[in-house]
Image (cartoon, helix red, strand yellow):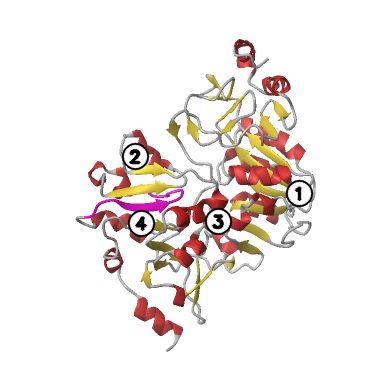
Amino acid sequence: MSWHETYRKKLITIDEALSNIKSNTKVVTSMACMEARGLLENIHRIKDVDNVAVATCLNIGEYPFFVEKEYEGMFLNESWFHSLGARKAVSKGLRTVTYIPNNLHSAGMERIMANKPDIFWGMASPMDRNGYMTVSLSNVYERDMVENAQLVIMEVNEKAPRTHGDTQVHISEVDYVIDNTFEIPELPDADPDEIEMKIAGHISDLVEDGSTLQIGIGGIPNAVAKLMENKKDLGIHTEMLTESMIHLFEKGAVTNRKKTLWPGKFIATFAFGTRRMYSFIEDNPAVFLMRGKYVNDPYVISQNEKMVSINTAITVDLTGQVCSEAIGTRHYSGTGGQLDTHRGAAMAKDGKGIIALRSSAKRGTVSTILPLLPYGSPVTVPRQDIDYVVTEYGVARLKGLNVFQRVEALLGISHPDFRSDLRKQAIEIGLI
């Protein structure tokens, strides 16, 4: 029997696949732009079920099963990283979404140990003549789920790029396939504003030629990329492959030649950008998408000399505690790989872990540098791990400093409108 015959025998419809989900079933799906749309758009149509858990990460769509009150008790979206839909559900008080605290490098295996999935329902690129498809643009936990779920269902999308690295899945590992072609969601580049360019200027000064980079998403990282076009022999070892990294490659700044690990290769665990970037990744042997438990392992990251991790934050307190995932008790996003990459970079030879943020928020009415984190704020990067903090007003290197010194360093890069009050509050609570 040919592998294509095997494929045809395993081919089912979305409704047939949904029939495998019963009360108390634990489902995991691929993350971000690889989320299995056939599952997420239709799971709410299953009748007479209770307590069906669906684990996702960075939902792109807002799907009925977790944004509509009528599905409370029937379905629960267990989210590794909140996006807009999850935040909306939580803000409405719905008990259809909950957060899974995690560090990205261990999220998948911890899930398998604590709540082994009954079903992994993912997305894949088309199968080749040898029976191999790939998990395409995300390998954070997807390969681990294929190997550990009781039932594996793959939506095969002709638009999903075939990728290199540790992404291959053989048809013999899959129980069912569904043909479901749609355009892969895109993440357009965010144009940086003046403040973000100032922050990026400070960060660019910290990045030496020959550095290996992890860069997050958003205006500040994009601004950083614009200011590093003249750097030489940069490399990429990153959680998320972004448009800005491809831009730096095309400008000649990224060559990957000086990397300690995997020279010549872009190393990432997932990719999210525009169709232009997906075309760049398609069947590109210079781009390796490896499992999150490898790419984001701090001890792997730290083997890259001159490793630089660039991440953003919501608030930082005057002792160096970083919150990047919540506004007080209101959960906003997730830890993701921030602590993984920050720790790895800070441990590397000549490495730097950088946390960047604007000095103020809400149109300049509040300081993002605070005496204490707001009540209920989770600590994303502990103060004992902090390295560099950057705002538009400069750079504070906190590693090794005592609390008195940290307060002074952070006051120096806080917004001038708030420095006097911050100092007064720091004195009142005994920080200085």
The image position of residue 335, as x and y in percent, is 53, 42
Give the Cα separation between the discs numbered 3 and 2.
26 Å
Which x, y percent locates residue 282? 57, 66
Q: Compare marks 3 and 2 and give the one earlier in the sequence.
A: 2
Q: Amino acid at mark 3?
A: Phe
Task: Say what amino acid the circle numbered 4 marks.
Answer: Lys
**Which one is in front, 110 or 49?**
110
Q: Is residue 198 visible?
A: no
Figure check: 174 above or below 422: below
Figure quadrant of the C terminus:
top right
Magenta segment: 49-63
Q: Is residue 201 left or right of residue 123?
A: right
Residue corresponding to mark 2: 89
Badge 2: residue crowd in 10 Å (few <14, some 14–19, many ≥20): some
Q: CA distance from mark 1 to mark 2?
A: 41 Å
Residue 270 got which mark? 3
Q: Nearer the viewer, residue 251 or 89?
A: 89
Q: Find out whether residue 235 is within the magenta segment.
A: no
Q: Name which of mark 4 and mark 1 comes first in the sequence.
A: 4
* Earlier sequence position, callout 3 versus callout 1: 1
Mark 2 → mark 4, Cα distance in angstroms:
20 Å
| Residue 60 among magenta residues | yes
Asked whether the residues under the numbered discs 2 and 4 touch, taking CB atoms below 8 Å apart as contact, a structural biologist would say no
Rendering coords of residue 188 (x, y %) = 52, 48
Q: Which residue is mark 4?
A: 26
Q: Residues within 10 Å of mark 4 (few under 14, many from 20)?
A: many
